[in-house]
Image (spheres, helix red, strand yellow):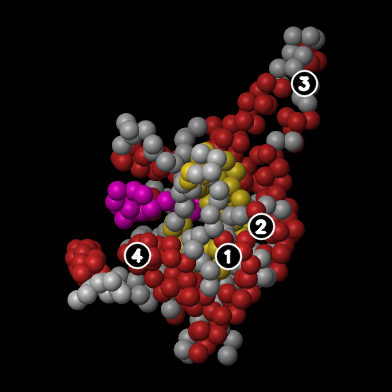
Amino acid sequence: MDTDLTSNYLGLTLRNPIVASASPLSATVIGVRQLHATGAGAIVLPSLFEEQIRHDMRSTERLSQVGSNSFPEASSYFPDTVRDDGVPHRYLDLIAEARHAVDIPIIASLNGTTVSGWVDYASQFEAAGASAIELNFYRIASSPTATGPEVEADCIALLKAVRARVKIPIAMKLHPHFSAFGAMARQLDAAGADGLVLFNRLYQADIDLVRLAWTNDVALSHPSEIRLGLLWLSQLSGRLSHASLAAGSGVETVDEVLKYLLAGADVVMTASALLRHGPGHIRTLLSDLKTWLELRDFKSVSEIRGLMEATHPVTDTERQERGDYIRSLTGYRGPYVRR
C-alpha cells in the first residue's frame, strides 16, 4: 500500500509533513540540497535578524557618503560592500539559489520585534523567490514597565506591517509566554497570519560556577518539551479561521511526530534531531511514519491529523484541564511516597 503523506501548510502543498526547521543545516545551498534529498517536505532557512539588517543599513549610509564633498561624480560611487557584501544581500542570494536548487517550498525567516524600515526586506524575500515567510517574533519583555497588552500589540503590528508588503504566505513563530495564548492566536489569525509555529524556544542564560560568568550555550531540544505544544495544538486545531498549525520543539523520533499530528499539527518541524543525527534522520522519521500508518490501516497522514484535538466547548476544556491538573498532583506515586 502506497501511503499518502501529502500535507498542506500555509496553502502550500508539501510531499510530506516533515519540515526542516531553521538551523545551520539550511544556511547553504549544499545543505538545502541535502535536506531535500533526504525527504524534507519544506525547508526553513536560518533567520535574518532585524539587527543584521539595521547594521547593514547603517554601513550603507556611512559608505555612501565617501567622497561626497570631493567632486560631482563622487555621489555615484558606492564601495562594493554597499552593493553585495552585506549579510542581507547574501541572504537574498541564498533564497534565490535555494529556490532554483530544489522543487520543494523554501521558507525565508525574518526575526525581529519592531515595526520600521527593516520590514521592507520582506518584499525582497518575495522577489528573490521565497515560497513563504516565517516571521519569528522573539522578544523577552524584561522591562518592568512593559505590559502584556503592549507586547501583544507589537506582535500584531509587526505581522500587519509585513502582511502589507507581501502576497506570499506568512507564518508567525511564537513563544508560549503570552498571558492568554488562545486569544493571541485568534488575533493573529484575524490579522492575516497564514500559519502559527508552536513554539519558539527562549534561550536562557546559565551561570558557569567555575568561571563565575554567564553562559548562553544553545541547548538542543528534548522530547520532554512537547507537552505544551500538544496542549495548544489540540486547543487551536479546528478553531482558527484559516491559519495552519506547525509544531516544533522536542521532535526526536516518530513518536513526537505522531503525537503532534494527532493533536492537530498540519506539519511537524525539526532541527535539533537533524543536528544530532544528520539530515538523513528525515528518512528515518518518514519511514517510521509510513510503517505506523500502514500497521493501523491508515491510507494517508490526513486521516490521523487532529484525531486527538479538543472537541468540547472551551469552558469544558478549562474545567477538564483543571481536573487533570488536580489528578496529576494528587495521584503521584513514587518509591518515597506512601498512599
- Determine whether, in the image, residue 2 is placed left or right of residue 137: right
Q: Nearer the viewer, residue 167 or 57?
A: 57
Disc 2 secondary structure class: helix
- Dot 1 corresponds to which residue? 273
**Disc 4 versus disc 3: nearer the observer:** 4
- Dot 4 corresponds to which residue? 231
Q: Residues within 10 Å of mark 1 (few under 14, many from 20)?
A: many
> What's the distance in space between the residues labelled 3 and 1, CA to CA?
49 Å
Q: Residues within 10 Å of mark 3 (few under 14, many from 20)?
A: few
Amino acid at the residue labelled 3:
Ser
- Determine whether, in the image, residue 73 is placed left or right of residue 8: right
**Disc 3 versus disc 1: nearer the observer:** 1
In the rendered structure, find residue 76 and report the number of the disc placed on it: 3
- Dot 2 corresponds to which residue? 25
Q: Which residues are magenta?
A: 170-187
> Do callouts 4 and 1 mark residues in contact (Cβ within 8 Å)?
no
